[in-house]
Structures are given as C-alpha cells and as structure tokens.
Image (cartoon, rainbow, N blue to C red):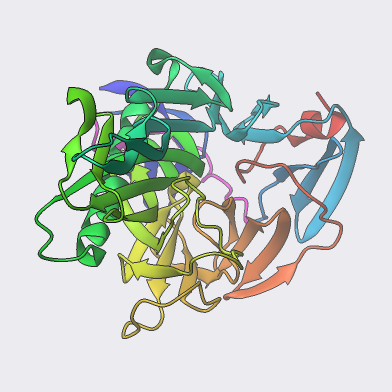
Amino acid sequence: MHRTRVTAVGNTKAQADGKWLNIIGNKAIAVGDFIWTDGKCIYGNISEGGGAAPVINSSEPYVPIFMEDGTHCLYHNDKLKTGRKDAKHKLMANRGSEVVFSDAYRGLDVSVGASGEVQELKYERYSHRNGALGYWFKDYGGSIGAKLGIYFEWEPQDHYWLAETETAFEQMKYAQVLQEGAKQTAERALLELEKQAPSGEGESMTVLPEKECRITGGWYESEHDYCLFLEGNAQALYMSGRNLGIYDDSERCWQVDFGTLYSLAVEYLLELVATPEGITVLRGRYNNNGSWRLTYLPLDEEYGEPYHFVDSIKSTDLRLPDGFKVTMSRNNKERIEYMGYEPDSYSYELKSPQGQKICEIDGYEPGQRLLACKLRPRTWLVAFDVKLYRVKNGEKKLIEGDYNHRNARLRPMKDWKNWMKGE
C-alpha cells in the first residue's frame, strides 16, 4: 500500500502512477487528491455516522485559464471570467490548488510533480555525424592516373543539445530515446538507398553521413506517464566506380578511377511517438538529396528534389494528458507513395479516458498541444491551437473572449478565488 496523487478521474476509476485504478468506497475522488492504493484499487471511505446523505454538486467545475498577457481567467458555466492581470509566463499547469509556471527557453511542457514541484519538458536533440563530406581529387600521374572520390574531414562524433545549447550526454533526459529514434530513421534511409542503388555493381560502398533525432512536442507527468513526439532525420550515401579503394589505408576517403564515380544520397525524415511502452513510427518522407546536408524535408519545399510520403500506421491512439487520447486514422487506406502531404490524409478524433468520442479535431498534427476537461455528461472544455472550445454532443463552439491561453493542462480548481486574485 502506498500514497500517490490522482492525475485523472473517470466514472468508476481514477488514474495514478500512469495506471487506471478501481475506486472502492464512497469518498469522492478528484484530480490532484492524494490517495492510498495497492496498485489495483483506490481505498477511500467516509463514515456516514447516521448523518444525512452527502449532497452531490451537479454544477460545472471551475477551470483556471492563464492568458498570454498574464491575465488570470476562470471558465465556469459557459462563461470565461477575467481576473487579475499578473506576471507573464510561457506555460501554466495546475493540480488541485497547486499552480506552477514555466518560462524555460524551448520549453515544451510544464506539470506539477508529486510534491508540488515544477516539472519542465525541454527541447532535446541528438546528432551523430560521420564527418564533413566533400569531393576529393588527386592526379597520381603515370600509369595510375587520376582518382576521384569522397572524403570525411573528421572522425565520427556524437552531439547533444538541451534547449538549443550543446551539452553532455549526462545532462540529457531522453538521450537514449533520441538515439533509438535516430537509429530507426537511419535504418529506413539505408533500406530506401538499397532499393534505389544500381544492382550488379561489384565495387561499391555505403555509409551514413549523418543521423539525428529531436523532440518536437509532448508532455510529461511522471516516468510512468508521458508522451514525446519525435522527428528523426538521416542520410545514407552510396558510391561506386572502377578500381574502388581506400586512400592511404584510411577509412576517411574513398576513391575510384576518374570519370567512373557514381554517388547517390537518400535523405529520410521519420515522425515517431515515444511513451513508457516504447517507440511507435507514425509516418515519414524521403528524397534524393545531392547536397549531403540534412534539410529536414519541410512540407512547404518548392525547389530541389521532390520527396515521397511513406505511411507506417493505419490507425493509432496518441496519448494526451490526464488519460485523454486522440485517434489518428489514415483516411485513404489504398493510396501509395506520393509527393507531399494532403490535408485530408488523416482524421483525428479526440476521446475521453473511457474511450468516449468527444469530437473531431480538424487541422491537428501530432505534437500540437491538445487538452480536454469534462464539464458535464457529454460536455467538455477543449483547448487546441491556443483557443478554447465548449464541446457538447460532439459539436464545438469557440468560447468568446479567448485569446492565446498558455495552459499546459485543463483541470478543475476548488480554490479558484485565490487564483483570480493573482499570484
């Protein structure tokens, strides 16, 4: 038996330590409450002592909303009330009466720890480079003749960034996750290169000039409850030619007879999602990139080599804070690779912790902040794209007065009067 904090509440179950537990007893359980559990059930009882039956409050909860300009607002009964304007912050999260703020550079999420401490999720990036690549030429003269090849200027190196500042491996929280994401992306790049490279070439070599992976979005509650959206990028290089060799007994330069060199580079971008259960590949895109420099294959690319889209999933659930999820489903299951993304390639459906459909989320992309809070049966408060919506029976209504909120969570608050007074 141990004590922990509730992160989400359903009808007969509550979430704690990243698991849904059965509620036993007659005590009302709310998000942020400390409870006792054996890992299966939540034990909560209130002795009635012959007294009157408890009164159940059927009114909607009070949900604190923090605006970009520092204004403390409160959503209740379909109204967004304005309180005191205080200091500006980039992100806010609450749990019960506890409130935390974050101003971290490249901060992706903030949450309240088990002891009320601030927990920040920051941008992280890992990169492995095989050296700076370039063309190499040398005229040996005589019977040997001229050679042309590809060189690597320095030895392979690993680099780590935390909030855009290069740091050590030990300072990274998700270094191993990012290394695995880069590895999976590199494997896809090598596989695609193998498909495109000429067959029957007896003299050829292949290398990975660069691979990397970075966190593009997500949230963190505990080591048992988090979701990270990742983007991996890798490049695979193929080279062939007559009398292929390694210059000066070094693996840092390949050379072939002048006029016979052929090289091909494939760049691959992969979108992934990481949870405590592991890494799932969502989708990717690739192209033939002759520059030997990672470009991240942006969606609005208009020049250069075209890229091709690759599906990896037909349908999957993406985890959101407090047990909510968004179901990502591919619409056209018969389509093949094509250039670019189509706006209607996927549909996104927001669901409650119990699997109840809340609404469709048009324009959503994996990694964007999407939050929800239950108000009444079949009625929800939803935050998406810095806007607030009241959703009833699947229909969304934009809440007037909402302008660029900075909530990292949508949760009820009992002690809302202090919130409205400011920090």
Residue at figure coordinates x 68%, y 34% from the top left: 92
Asked whether, in this view, residue 89 is left or right of residue 183, the answer is: right
User: In the image, is residue 370 above or below residue 303?
Assistant: above
Location of the C terminus by quadrant is top right
Q: Nearer the viewer, residue 392 or 246?
A: 246
Q: Nearer the viewer, residue 224 or 291?
A: 291
Residue at figure coordinates x 79%, y 28% from the top left: 418
Location of the N terminus by quadrant is top left
Residue 36 can be seen, yes or no: no
Residue at figure coordinates x 21%, y 65% from the top left: 195
Asked whether, in this view, residue 338 is left or right of residue 43, the answer is: right
The x, y position of residue 372, in whole percent, is 57, 54
**Quadrant assignment, res 302:** bottom right
The x, y position of residue 68, in whole percent, is 81, 41
User: In the image, is residue 63 above or below residue 335?
Assistant: above
**What stretch of residues is rendered in magenta?**
39-58
**Quadrant assignment, res 223:** top left
Asked whether, in this view, residue 366 is left or right of residue 156, the answer is: right
Residue 199 can be seen, yes or no: yes
User: In the image, is residue 239 above or below residue 172?
Assistant: below
Residue at figure coordinates x 39%, y 72% from the top left: 329
Residue lying furthest front: 142
The x, y position of residue 332, in whole percent, is 38, 83
Residue 44 forms part of the magenta stretch: yes
What predominant SS class does the magenta segment belong to? loop
Asked whether, in this view, residue 301 is left or right of residue 103, the answer is: left
Residue 95 forms part of the magenta stretch: no
Number of marks present in the image shown: 0
The x, y position of residue 265, in whole percent, is 35, 54
Q: Nearer the viewer, residue 83 or 131?
A: 131
